[in-house]
Image (cartoon, rainbow, N blue to C red):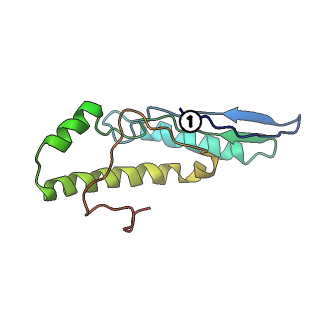
Amino acid sequence: MIIMSTRYVLPTTSKLIFAPIGDIHHNAPGFDRDRFVDSIQWLRETSEKTNRKVIVPLMGDELELLSGSERRSYRASGLHGSTRAWMEQRMMEDLLKLYADLVPIKHLIPHVIAGNHNFAFQESAVKASQKYI
């Protein structure tokens, strides 16, 4: 367990808006991107008010990726390297789309908690050292 503490000192006339976001599943077929982008815009605009402090932790399952059992099957599947690289390239593209939507509030996100839909990139074709982030 990791326990973190951050102290925020607010003037008595200010308001703290704590808006955790979880289970986004940004790349899922039923994801409502318009509603999500509207929420991000509202958080950004609200954070620009001088009497507001907005904190937006991400609470997990930001993308619709493999669950734990699916990750085990994926690792044991014996897929060709090129197939794995293609799948991981697609996952990276989805991650970058999520990131692009979050850019307006990235300064409001103190941390990201992993959910059960996470993924560790393994193919050499998709590395963080490349052009991505």
Please state the horizontal and vertical placement of residue 112, each as a whole percent of the image. 52, 42
Asked which quadrant contains residue 56, the reply is: top right
Along the line of sight, the residue nearer the viewer: 56 or 79: 79
The residue that appears at 24% across and 31% down in the rendered structure is 69
Tag count in the figure? 1
Along the line of sight, the residue nearer the viewer: 84 or 97: 84
Please state the horizontal and vertical placement of residue 64, each as a whole percent of the image. 33, 38
The residue that appears at 54% across and 53% down in the rendered structure is 103
Asked which quadrant contains residue 30, the reply is: top left
Query: Where is 126 relative to 112, above or below?
Result: below
- Looking at the image, the residue that sits furthest to the right is 12
Q: Amino acid at mark 1?
A: Ile
Give neighbour class at mark 1: few <14, some 14-19, many 20+ (Cα, 10 Å).
Answer: few
Query: Where is 109 relative to 18, above or below?
Result: below
Does 79 sit left or right of 25 as displayed? left
Does 87 sit left or right of 28 as displayed? left
The residue that appears at 39% across and 68% down in the rendered structure is 131
Please state the horizontal and vertical placement of residue 106, each as a whole percent of the image. 58, 51
Q: Quadrant of the C terminus?
A: bottom left
Does 3 sit left or right of 128 as displayed? right
Question: What residue would you read off at disc 1?
Answer: 2
Task: Give the secondary structure at mark 1.
Answer: loop
The residue that appears at 14% across and 54% down in the rendered structure is 83
